[in-house]
Image (cartoon, helix red, strand yellow):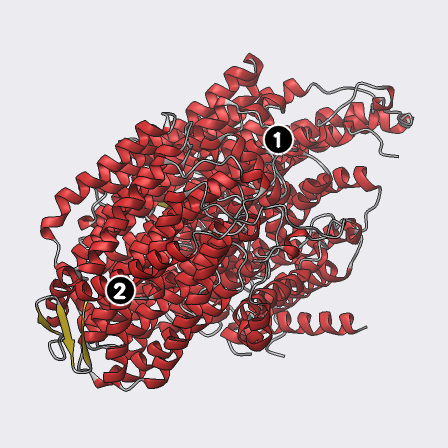
């Protein structure tokens, strides 16, 4: 009981910290700071219709690189932790319930469509809501579906990690090209900006997003596959 | 130069590529990763050199080609170059160290390791606060993942707790960042600094959230259980990276982000630092797990760095120097110790005794520990010196006390650990294996500590004057440690004499006197070393280290040089003392009292410096800032070395248990270092300054009480060497009392005692040490009748105890005579009475040395012992000649001494009439006295010989125990517990009040530590609670509810 | 009523979610529930980001037929917090996945999800 009261008091304390943040909460009417700058200039400077994408891929490209690294780290750590002390004994064998007919049939239809949709989302990241992360996540969802439909199937780790590597190197390569051909690491203006609002525009953003999409897709897939391959605990 | 962005691109590029490269095999992958780390280190090194030469200016790296705040920028300045260099170097060395684990584990571990080092680089360089958040997450995630390199029940728990805790901390940081952006419209750190967030309504809370999260990343006490668990349970290779690289980078982050907050935060950062420094080191006292102990120590050091950071306005230009010194010592030493713990593979501190089986590892461990505590020649020594000077100079004496108290606590547990390593039981422990790839990094950091220490000294004007040649000589002796004793002994003696030859022309009289005692006396003591066979591994470097320190304090022209010498001497004598068989506890109490004394000295020297621009020794003559306190602190510092009452408890054990030829070194020679210091400071106080009368009066009483209690304790010893040790305490009390009189005669008496004590205590310790070597026991009741086997030893002891007891005609009488004259002139009658009684007691205990050891019946097992070794006899007889000369021709010494003292105390000199000294109370002549008493003695002797010529000898076995063997045979010995009767009368004076006091203090500290550390219940949830409570409490304190 | 704007509702909800998350950390013994608490905490911060970006009567920061590119500055909400939210979500995802994995590993040792059972490291 005392503990509960104590925690309640603590939460009150934390709450009061938050409350005093809100001293300034007047309704915002105008963009300010860098938000305003982007709204005014991003379209001209980078040629991307989706300003969030412009911020994510170019202006704050280093964050995105970090973000990709975090997913990459997660999949790498999962990979080595779950592979620790794998014994080749029989309890390594996983037993799965067979998937239902509907799932199996539907997956055959759905998976290609989901793949294409995922690709669409990241290729059009500079024009419409979406981008590499979203597209990659959609692609990974196709893998989930395939795993559910065919639980006993094996997905090659080596294949996934090769895709991941190529996409990662591509991302870094594009970044370094930015130093060589344009004015800084991850500058997207290494290619022509193209016509505003069309698919081939915004310089290297679509290229980078393709790499990011592939990489995120591969990383999420590898996380899922690693978790799936963990043997039953009971 | 290579663009720093390639630190990131190369690391990430290779990390991503490992998915493909990994197919080429483990060895190729490891090679690629290590070369990437080397490349990263190369980039930082290149920039660091450019900045260091002063040609380069701070550069901004704009990503995406836009200026900040539009896009993220990185900064590469001197600090960034230095910190990334540190991170990358430890990354590379740590990578090499971890090769065996990398080979066993999946290639993913390599990528995680690489990304971790990359992340640390970015958090150092980035100037964008959200970017900082992202890469801090990368760092936490990789550390949490790497904990699983060595997967077991413990590390899994630690990894999870660490991840949860850092995620919540990062979450709080994110909230701060969100609102920082909301209020200012920028994420750039420089812009945030410029907008002065604290002036915006609600901005103070933003600053609070950002700073408190970054402070929490630095593991402040007590919200740091999650970090301690990781230190304890992860593989040592990772511990080294966290402690050296990650902590270094996090500290840099705080130093760059705290500018957002403005000055009112500085105080709180220091405060949190102080709580962490003290708290963490206090809890370290109860620790018996090596890695967790290192964790506590790491966190403590971060606390110290936070204190310094909070004082950067006050330290001004000195801030980088101080931070650099402390940080770099901690960085190298902690990495080295963690790596060492992985090689030694000992969990419990007591198991570290195994390290002794490979003596050079002991050297490495010692290097790291001394660097952590701040001994010369390591960078932390110079940094701590500057820190204390500046803190005192700005009037922050409380903070000096905090810093020194925390350091003291750290010294306690580190030296206890070292004691286990040097002296602990190691028979049952298996020798550890050494892998080359694990050895190389340890060696590199150890050597780097010495090199960086040397350069740190050169960086300041005052440090550049330090003479490193004696220390280099120690290094030489260390390098030739494999040679046999007689070679090293000859080299050591030659080196000391050579040094004396070069030094003596420049010394004034007082310094020359002490230099002769230290160096010529030291060389004489070393002669006894020829008696030892084999290698006597490790003896010469430490003995010379002590002498290097002793000559250092003599030659010092600045207070820094003095303190440097003082610390060297402390370190050397510690090693000498702990070499004895049962010396572990005594070595510990010696070093702790010494460090405590050294800190008092340091604080006092800091106060002395206030108001002066230089550090010359002459500042002691004119202390302006709280002079009484300053002098008192300095005097206390010196009194720990002269073993004044209350600070004496280390001495009996340390001197008693030391090796035979070490006892004279640490008694006859080393104790004079404290006397020399007292002389300097009392000269500084001046003869006629009434301001300090209280101080000298107290000092006088302290001396008098030391005299009497020292001799009473000596009375009840059964151990010959302990008896001499207590006698030393008493004798040093005379010297302190004499000096405290502050008159010509008092000082003349004190100096006479200095010379006398050197002569007879040297002879006595040397002789009895040599006897002990022959008979194999310290206990007097196990000896007896040795006069027949060891006539040389008998003569030496007889003459020197006559001198010690102050019986005419030998020189001890000269001291006493001067002494009583001085006390009467001063009007200190009570003190005089006390010392007079003590002379009588001295008589009683000294008599036992002859009676019990040399007279009586020879023991069965001593029937065939030989007389003491010739190598011991040589120095003994050289000094015996000195003693006799001083006795019969005292004017040869006392007249020049008098002239020397007259410089400071011109009034009340002795008048000399040939060999006769005349004071206002009487006169005395050494030669006349000698001839008179000698003649009387001869007459009595002749009469005795004549009258007892018919006496017949009692056979040794004319004795019976009624057929029974007594349970404790020594109780039947006539000399056992001789003074039982006396004891019944004066037992009250032998109650070990002082020991009890210090034991209580120790117990109190340990109990507090034991109680407080229950905070770390091991429950991951309670760690979360600590974090939230920490946030709320600091909020209430700083923002004020 | 002037405080009851959509933005402030966003803030309030975000903070409440964060507080619920903290409450969960401090009271729940089950590790999975603690991880869920973390997810709540994390979502709260994302909501804060969205609320920070919000400006009344404006549209998403994408310049298409509905937004005049010349007048974008007066028609769209702030794109920066959205970009940050994207990053924060991905980080949260990574951490959650790791926490679950670590829990899995831990569960294998003691077959328990009670965090108070894992006290092997202390003092």
Which of the image's four quarters has the N terminus of chain B? top left
Within 10 Å of disc 1 (Cα), the crowding (few <14, some 14-19, many 20+) is many
Disc number placed over residue A76 in the picture, else none: 1
At horizontal 22% and vertical 62% (from top left) the residue drawn is B930
Q: Is residue A32 visible in the rendered structure shown here?
A: no
Q: Is residue B298 left or right of residue B551?
A: right
Instruction: Report the chain holding disc 2.
Output: B
Vertical order, B800 against A107 (above or below):
below
Vertical order, A96 against B459 (above or below):
above
Q: SS of the residue at dot 2?
A: helix
Vertical order, B142 against B852 (above or below):
above
Which of the image's four quarters has the C terminus of chain B? bottom right
Q: Is residue B987 visible in the rendered structure shown here?
A: yes
In this rendered view, identify the residue nearer to me: B438 or B521. Answer: B521
Q: Do circles 2 and 1 both sit on a common chain?
A: no
Q: SS of the residue at dot 1?
A: helix
At horizontal 31% and vertical 45% (from top left) the residue drawn is B876
Foreground mark, 2 or 1, reads 2
Instruction: Report the chain holding disc 1.
Output: A
Disc number placed over residue B932 in the picture, else none: none
Which residue carries the number 2 mark?
B933
Within 10 Å of disc 2 (Cα), the crowding (few <14, some 14-19, many 20+) is some
In this rendered view, identify the residue nearer to me: B409 or B886. Answer: B886
Q: Position of residue B1012 (x, y in %)?
A: 64, 64
Q: Is residue B241 left or right of residue B497?
A: right
Do callouts 2 and 1 mark residues in contact (Cβ within 8 Å)? no
At horizontal 14% and vertical 42% (from top left) the residue drawn is B501
């Amino acid at each position: 009981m005392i503990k509960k009261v104590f925690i309640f008091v603590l939460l009150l304390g934390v709450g009061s910290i938050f409350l005093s943040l809100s001293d300034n909460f007047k309704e915002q009417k105008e963009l300010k700071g860098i938000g305003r700058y982007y709204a005014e200039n991003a379209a001209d400077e980078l040629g991307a219709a989706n300003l969030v994408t412009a911020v994510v891929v170019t202006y704050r490209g280093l964050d995105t690189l970090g973000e990709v690294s975090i997913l990459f780290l997660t999949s790498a750590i999962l990979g080595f932790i779950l592979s620790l002390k794998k014994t080749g004994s029989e309890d390594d064998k996983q037993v799965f319930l067979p998937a239902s007919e509907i799932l199996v049939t539907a997956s055959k239809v759905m998976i290609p469509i989901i793949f294409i949709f995922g690709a669409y989302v990241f290729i059009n990241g500079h024009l419409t809501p979406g981008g590499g992360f979203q597209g990659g996540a959609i692609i990974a969802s196709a893998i989930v579906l395939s795993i559910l439909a065919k639980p006993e199937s094996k997905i090659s780790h080596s294949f996934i990690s090769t895709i991941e590597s190529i996409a990662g190197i591509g991302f870094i390569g594009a970044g370094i090209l930015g130093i060589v051909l344009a004015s800084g690491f991850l500058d997207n203006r290494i290619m022509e900006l193209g016509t505003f609002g069309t698919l081939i525009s915004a310089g290297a953003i679509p290229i980078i997003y393709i790499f990011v999409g592939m990489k995120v897709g591969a990383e999420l897939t590898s996380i899922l596959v690693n978790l799936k391959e963990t043997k039953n605990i009971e | 130069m290579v663009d720093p962005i390639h630190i990131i691109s190369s690391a990430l590029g290779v990390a991503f590529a490992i998915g493909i490269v990994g197919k080429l095999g483990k060895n190729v992958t490891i090679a690629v990763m290590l070369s990437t780390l080397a490349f990263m280190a190369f980039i930082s090194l290149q920039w660091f050199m450019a900045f260091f030469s002063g040609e380069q200016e701070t550069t901004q790296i704009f990503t995406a080609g836009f200026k900040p705040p539009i896009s993220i920028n990185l900064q590469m300045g001197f600090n960034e170059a230095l910190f990334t260099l540190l991170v990358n170097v430890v990354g590379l060395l740590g990578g090499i160290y971890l090769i065996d684990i990398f080979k066993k584990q999946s290639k993913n571990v390599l990528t995680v390791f690489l990304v971790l080092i990359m992340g640390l680089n970015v958090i150092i360089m980035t100037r964008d606060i959200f970017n900082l958040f992202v890469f801090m997450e990368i760092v936490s995630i990789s550390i949490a993942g790497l904990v699983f390199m060595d997967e077991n029940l413990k590390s899994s728990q630690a990894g999870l707790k660490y991840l949860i805790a850092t995620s919540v901390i990062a979450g709080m940081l994110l909230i701060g960042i969100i609102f920082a952006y909301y209020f200012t419209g920028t994420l750039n750190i420089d812009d945030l600094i410029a907008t002065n967030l604290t002036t915006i309504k609600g901005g103070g809370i933003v600053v609070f959230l950002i700073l408190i999260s970054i402070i929490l990343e630095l593991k402040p006490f007590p919200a740091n259980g999650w970090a301690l668990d990781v230190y304890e349970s992860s593989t040592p290779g990772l511990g080294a990276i966290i402690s050296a690289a990650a902590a270094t980078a996090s500290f840099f982050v705080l130093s760059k982000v705290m500018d957002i907050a403005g000055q009112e935060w500085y105080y709180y950062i220091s405060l949190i630092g102080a709580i962490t420094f003290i708290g963490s080191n206090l809890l370290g006292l109860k620790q018996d797990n090596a890695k967790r102990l290192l964790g506590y120590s790491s966190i403590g050091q971060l606390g110290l760095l936070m204190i310094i950071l909070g004082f950067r306005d006050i330290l001004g230009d000195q801030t980088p120097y101080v931070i650099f010194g402390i940080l770099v010592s901690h960085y190298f030493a902690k990495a080295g110790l963690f790596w060492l713990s992985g090689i030694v593979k000992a969990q419990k501190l007591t198991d570290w005794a195994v390290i002794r089986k490979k003596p050079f590892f002991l050297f490495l461990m010692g290097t790291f520990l001394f660097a952590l505590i701040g001994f010369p020649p390591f960078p932390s020594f110079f940094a701590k010196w500057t820190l204390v000077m500046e803190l005192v100079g700005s009037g922050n004496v409380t903070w000096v006390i905090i810093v020194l108290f925390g350091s003291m606590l750290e010294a306690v547990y580190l030296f206890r650990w070292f004691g286990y390593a040097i002296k602990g039981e190691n028979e049952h422990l298996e020798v550890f294996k050494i892998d080359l790839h694990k050895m190389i990094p340890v060696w590199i950091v150890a050597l780097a500590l010495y090199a960086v220490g040397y350069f740190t000294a050169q960086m300041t004007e005052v440090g550049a004057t330090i003479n490193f040649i004696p220390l280099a000589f120690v290094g030489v002796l260390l390098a030739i440690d494999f040679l046999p004793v007689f070679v090293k002994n000859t080299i050591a003696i030659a080196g000391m004499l050579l040094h004396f030859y070069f030094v003596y022309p420049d010394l004034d009289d007082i310094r020359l006197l002490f230099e002769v005692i230290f160096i010529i006396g030291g060389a004489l003591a070393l002669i006894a070393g020829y008696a030892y066979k084999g290698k006597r591994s490790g003896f010469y470097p430490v003995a010379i280290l002590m002498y290097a320190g002793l000559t250092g304090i003599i030659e010092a022209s600045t207070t820094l040089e003095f303190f440097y010498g003082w610390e060297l001497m402390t370190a050397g004598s510690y090693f000498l003392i702990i070499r004895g068989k049962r010396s572990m506890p005594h070595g510990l109490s010696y070093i702790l009292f010494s460090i405590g004394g050294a800190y008092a000295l340091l604080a006092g020297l800091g106060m002395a410096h206030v108001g002066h621009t230089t550090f010359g020794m002459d500042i002691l003559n004119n202390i302006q800032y709280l002079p009484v306190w300053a002098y008192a602190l300095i005097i206390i510092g010196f009194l720990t070395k002269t073993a004044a009452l209350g600070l004496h408890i280390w001495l009996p054990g340390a001197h008693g248990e030391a090796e035979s030829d070490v006892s004279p070194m640490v008694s006859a020679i080393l104790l004079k270092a404290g006397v020399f210091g007292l002389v300097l400071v009392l000269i500084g106080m001046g003869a006629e300054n009434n301001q300090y009368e209280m101080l000298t009066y107290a000092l006088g009483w302290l001396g008098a009480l030391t005299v009497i209690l020292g001799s009473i304790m000596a009375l009840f010893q059964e151990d010959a060497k302990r008896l001499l040790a207590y006698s030393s305490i008493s004798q040093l009390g005379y010297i302190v009392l004499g000096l405290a009189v502050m008159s010509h005669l008092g000082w003349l008496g004190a100096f006479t005692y200095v010379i006398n004590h050197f002569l007879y205590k040297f002879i006595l310790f040397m002789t009895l040490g040599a006897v002990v070597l022959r008979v194999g026991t310290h206990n007097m009741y196990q000896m007896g009748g040795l006069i027949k086997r060891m006539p040389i030893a008998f003569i030496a002891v007889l003459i020197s105890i006559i001198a010690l007891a102050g019986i005419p005609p030998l020189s001890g009488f000269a001291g006493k005579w001067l002494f009583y004259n001085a006390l009467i002139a001063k009007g200190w009658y009570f003190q005089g009475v006390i010392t007079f009684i003590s002379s009588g007691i001295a008589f009683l205990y000294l008599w036992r040395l002859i009676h019990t050891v040399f007279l009586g019946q020879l023991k069965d097992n001593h029937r065939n012992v030989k007389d003491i070794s010739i190598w011991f006899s040589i120095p003994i007889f050289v000094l015996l000649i000195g003693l006799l000369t001083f006795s019969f021709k005292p004017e040869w010494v006392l007249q020049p001494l008098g002239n020397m003292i007259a410089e400071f105390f011109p009034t009340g000199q002795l008048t000399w009439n040939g060999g006769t000294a005349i004071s206002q109370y009487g006169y005395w002549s050494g030669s006349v006295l000698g001839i008179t008493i000698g003649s009387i003695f001869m007459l009595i002797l002749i009469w005795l010989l004549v009258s007892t010529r018919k006496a017949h000898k009692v056979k040794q076995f004319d004795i019976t125990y009624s057929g029974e063997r007594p349970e404790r045979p020594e109780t039947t010995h006539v000399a056992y517990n001789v003074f039982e009767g006396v004891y019944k009368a004066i037992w009250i004076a032998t109650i070990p009040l002082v020991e009890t006091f210090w034991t209580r203090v120790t117990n109190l500290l340990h109990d507090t530590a034991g109680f407080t550390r229950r905070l770390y219940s091991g429950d991951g949830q309670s760690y979360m609670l600590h974090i939230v409570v920490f946030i709320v409490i600091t909020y209430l304190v700083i923002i004020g509810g | 009523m002037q405080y009851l704007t959509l933005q402030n509702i966003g803030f309030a909800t975000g903070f409440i979610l964060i507080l619920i998350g903290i409450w969960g950390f401090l009271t729940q013994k089950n590790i999975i529930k603690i991880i869920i608490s973390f997810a709540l905490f994390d979502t709260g911060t994302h909501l804060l980001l969205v609320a920070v970006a919000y400006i009344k009567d404006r549209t998403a920061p994408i310049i298409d037929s509905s937004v005049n590119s010349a007048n974008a500055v007066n028609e769209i909400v702030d794109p920066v917090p959205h970009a940050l939210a994207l990053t924060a979500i991905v980080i949260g995802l990574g951490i959650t996945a790791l926490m679950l994995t670590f829990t899995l590993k831990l569960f294998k040792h003691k077959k328990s999800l009670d965090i108070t059972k894992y006290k092997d490291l202390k003092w």
